[in-house]
Image (spheres, grey):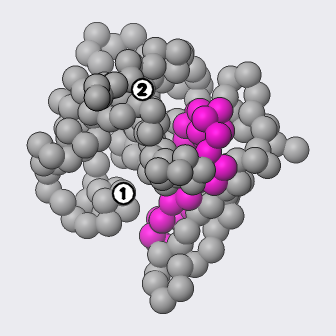
Amino acid sequence: MHLIISPYPARYEKHAVTTTALPVFVRPIKPEDAPLLVDLFHVLSPTSIYFRFFSPIKELSEDMLARFTQIDYDREIALVAVDASGTAQEILLGVARVISDPDGKKAEFAVLVGDLWQGKGIGALLLENCLHIAKERGIETVWGTVLRENTQMLALGRKLGFSVCRVPESTDCELTIDLRAVTFDEAGRIQRS
């Protein structure tokens, strides 16, 4: 029996502008993005690292880099935002991912944006595009665990229509969105009523 590896989904590549007028190139992550992901990690504050990884890690291990960049495109959606303002060097500004359960109906999300680019609409743009792709694939519910003190992520979740509830016997919160009740515009952005 042959293992089939899905090809790079170039159809998800696009140029976009964030709500703060920052030009970015959004595309799926590639295995060769490992060095760019290391560079992104190095511009993160200890707080940002803790909020994303739930522990104070110092470096991304080779195993972590492989897990984050060498993905199964059929089961995982991982989009990166690259600076498109004309710099010669490719700079990764942020990454968002949605990883589906084996049943393909529920998925977990994660978002990471470099400290220099937080609050510029990159996380919202990436997550909305991931959710749009997830809905196209038939995923019904997307959820994620967020630390209670991560107020920016909680605010982003609420803005995008996630419900926020406290995890019992924990200081964590769970964000959940029912994609069956969400509509998207042609650009992959959530339509708000």
Q: Tell me the residue at 39%/23% (across/down).
A: 6
Q: Position of residue 24 (x, y in %)?
A: 48, 22
Q: Earlier in the sequence, mark 1 or mark 2?
A: 2
- Please say whether residue 76 is visible from this viewpoint: yes
Q: Give the answer, above or below, for where 172 lies relative to 101.
A: below
Q: Residue furthest bottom?
A: 169
Residue at 40 percent across and 43 percent down: it is 113
Q: Is residue 175 above or below residue 82?
A: below
Q: Secondary structure at mark 2?
A: strand
- At numbered mark 1, what does the secondary structure look like: helix, strand or loop? helix
User: Which quadrant holds residue 1?
Assistant: top left
Q: Is residue 119 visible?
A: no
Q: Eyeballing the image, is 58 above or below 80?
A: below
Q: Quadrant of residue 189?
A: top right
Please name the residue shown 27% across and 33% down the image.
70
Task: Please state the extent of the stretch shown in magenta in the rendering.
Answer: 127-155
Is residue 131 shown in magenta? yes
Identify residue for label 2.
28
Inspect the image, locate mark 1, and give the three-letter code of the amino acid beneath it: Arg
